[in-house]
Image (cartoon, rainbow, N blue to C red):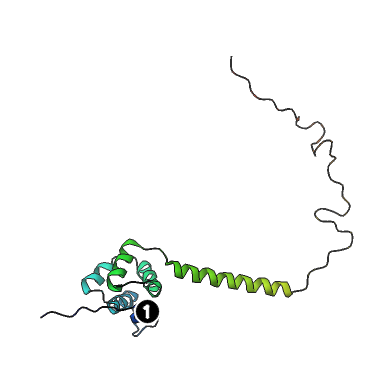
Amino acid sequence: MRHAKRTWKNQDQIRHLDEPAHEFDNPKEQVAFELLKLGVSHAGVIELLSYPLERIERQLSYMEYRKAKRPEAFIVEAIRNDYSIPKQMQYAKNKAAFSRAKRIMDEDAKLPRRQTPPGFEGHGTAGAAGPHPANDGLEPGGPSRDLVLPGPHV
């Protein structure tokens, strides 16, 4: 008797993996269940559980951003080869971080600015004179401006 293989027509058929249908005490059992939901065979799940749990969970979290025609095969290869983050997911993270940074900057722009004390002219003390232009800030009796290069050895 042949069993019909589950096929996925489009990305909408992949269940959201972050919505657990069952709660497990052991994280490996939860990951195994998620892999089975994607259609990975029992033998495939046993093989994949030899990889670090963090890698498996990371690849499972990426699946909603993947355009896999066969998610069960794709997740196996993704875990084996430790695929990088999908571009769409990286873009979403960058966009969220940019939005947060922009919101913080906008809130900061609304805060009143500190007033500088009268007579303050920047770094250092008020009215302090800089180095004399003739000596470029070199101390008297300090290093010479003449550059001496070693000559060829004779």
Mark 1, residue position: 17
Front residue of 81 and 2: 2
In the picture, measured across the screen, residue 114 lies left or right of residue 86, that is right
Crowd band around label 1 with a 10 angstrom C-alpha radius: few (<14), some (14–19), many (20+): some
In the picture, measured across the screen, residue 93 lies left or right of residue 59, that is right
Residue sitting at 83 percent across and 42 percent down? 131
Residue sitting at 84 percent across and 45 percent down? 130
In the picture, measured across the screen, residue 123 lies left or right of residue 20, that is right
Residue 31 location in percent, x, y? 33, 75
Residue sitting at 83 percent across and 64 percent down? 116
Compared with 148, 75 (above or below) is below
Residue 51 location in percent, x, y? 31, 65
Looking at the image, which residue sits at the far top? 154
Residue sitting at 84 percent across and 39 percent down? 133
In the picture, measured across the screen, residue 31 lies left or right of residue 102, that is left
Front residue of 149 and 124: 149
SS for dot 1: loop
Q: Which amino acid does label 1 sit on?
A: Leu
Looking at the image, which residue sits at the far left? 1
Q: Quadrant of the C terminus?
A: top right
Residue 142 location in percent, x, y? 78, 32
